[in-house]
Image (cartoon, rainbow, N blue to C red):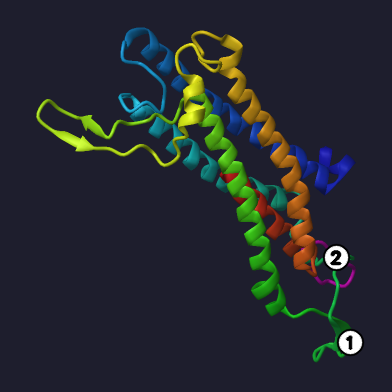
Amino acid sequence: MIFDYFGEEITFYFAFMNHYSKCLGFGALLSLIYYVYTKLQAVYCRYYLDVCHPDRRDVVPLLVFSVSILFGTALFIKFWERRFSYLHMKYNLFTHGDGTGANTTHNNKIEARKEFKADMIVKNKITNEFEKFYPRWKRELIKQPLSWVVLLLFTGFSLFCMVVCLNMEGMVVRVDRHHRQTDSTVTNRPTPALHIASLHRLSEDGRIFDKRQHLLGGYLPKILYSVVVMLCSQIFQVVATALNDFENYEIMSEYNKNFTIKRIFFEFFQ
């Protein structure tokens, strides 16, 4: 019914949102199980600390949870591809008659970008028509590497903000140079490279970010990081668009594909 009234795009939008909502339910259930487990650990395990503490022994459930989410994401994409194909077949969208008996594939429609800037006009040897031309080597050897340099710098700044906030929370624990593993062995364990002592001290007993002494101050690093992530996402949207325009793609599908790759790369490290 939605297809009859609103067309193809609205139908696939609601189909995807329905599929996405169902998959989020499984993720929420898995998160609830892990949350209950950690709360039980907090009650019944006297050695319960935080996730990054070196003495913590329940990292296996966290690993299982993370891997499950990772594989769940891959399954989400695969099941959506099946659903997408099913809807195409159901509404007969792979082919449609044009009055000549020929079939036109929707996926093969090429939408040219109005912003595309050509270096020259050349004659197509097949159609004998003049068309815009831009050398691929300029894009692949010059513009794309420059774009990725900017992208890496921006991602590095985002990671630096994350490290700062983790140190402010006391999550990056300093390890003594001589760490006794057993009664008979002593091993050298250097302090983590991401440890920033001046920021970590702010989370120690009685300091401003100590959760046991200051309830609001203990959550302040998380709040600051959330604001930083939101601002970085907004700024990155503008930066990624500018980089894509700089790379000068001719068709929208290629433009959108490269924009999505940049977005996924950045979001992965946030």
Say which amino acid is labelled 2.
Arg
Q: Amino acid at mark 1?
A: Glu
- Nearest the viewer among 265 and 30 is 265
Q: Residue at x 82, y 88 (%)?
A: 124
Looking at this view, name the residue that lies furthest to the left: 184
Q: Is residue 100 magenta?
A: yes
Label 2: which secondary element: loop
Q: Are marks 1 and 2 in contact (CB under 8 Å)?
A: no
x, y percent for residue 165: 56, 30
Q: Which residue is mark 1?
A: 129
Q: Which mark is residue 113?
A: 2
Stretch of the chain drawn in magenta: 96-105
**Whole-percent x, y for residue 242 in the image:** 79, 57
Prevailing secondary structure of the magenta residues: loop
Taking depth in this image into account, of 15 and 154 the one nearest to the observer is: 154
Task: Answer whether residue 80 is visible to the viewer in this image.
Answer: no
Could you tell me which quadrant the C terminus lies in?
top right
N-term mark: 1 or 2: 2
Q: How many marks?
A: 2
- Spatial CA distance of label 1 from label 2 is 19 Å
